[in-house]
Image (spheres, rainbow, N blue to C red):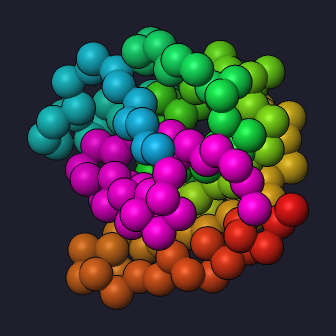
Amino acid sequence: MFKKILIVYYSRTGITRKVAHALSEKLKCDVIPLIDHKNRKGPLGYLSCAAESATSERPMIEEVKDLVNYDFVIIGTPIWAMTMCGPVRTFLHKYKNELSKVAFFCTMGVSGDKDVFWEMERISGKDPIATASFTTADVKKGKFSINPFVKQIQQRP
């Protein structure tokens, strides 16, 4: 089991935040939202998110401090335009050298998780210990299980 775990995530609508906080409660670990200062509200915000992701844009995010204090970081992203969101892309590019071991999770409408996990692995240069995807519909209904993901994490030395 890891000594010090951190969950880092981005959430525009609260769906990814809900999963991140459920994981944090179960794993008894710290959780930090990635913060950018773009207006992402409403239909125009949604369209700008999709365009940003489709073009692999890396928006500015607030600094994430003390990553070296964690021996394991779980990174969560919503899927926008069949790829990870821009703030998570920025985080991975900026902090990949400060990450030791990682796991990834995503929230999505229907699909895209495998490509997103591949891209997260490629950018971070890290092979994830575990991955998990959750549909927006299941999270909204409260019908999602983090247990298999948590079990994979807890079984690692």
What residue is rendered at 56% in x and 43% in y?
6
Q: Is residue 103 left or right of residue 12?
A: right
Q: Is residue 92 left or right of residue 146?
A: right
Give, as a single range, the part of the protein colored magenta: 1-29
Which is more toward the observer, 44 or 149?
149
**49 above or below 22?**
above
- Please provide percent x and percent y for residue 131: 69, 64
Residue 33 visible here: yes
- Please provide percent x and percent y for residue 64: 50, 20
Please check the rendered image and state whether residue 18 is part of the magenta-colored stretch, yes or no: yes
Q: Residue furthest left?
A: 42
- Please provide percent x and percent y for residue 13: 24, 50
Quarter of the image that includes the C terminus:
bottom right
Q: Is residue 138 left or right of residue 134?
A: left
Q: Is residue 103 left or right of residue 16?
A: right
Quarter of the image that includes the N terminus:
bottom right
**127 above or below 151?**
above
Residue 53 visible here: no
Residue 155: image quadrant is bottom right
- Please provide percent x and percent y for residue 112: 60, 62
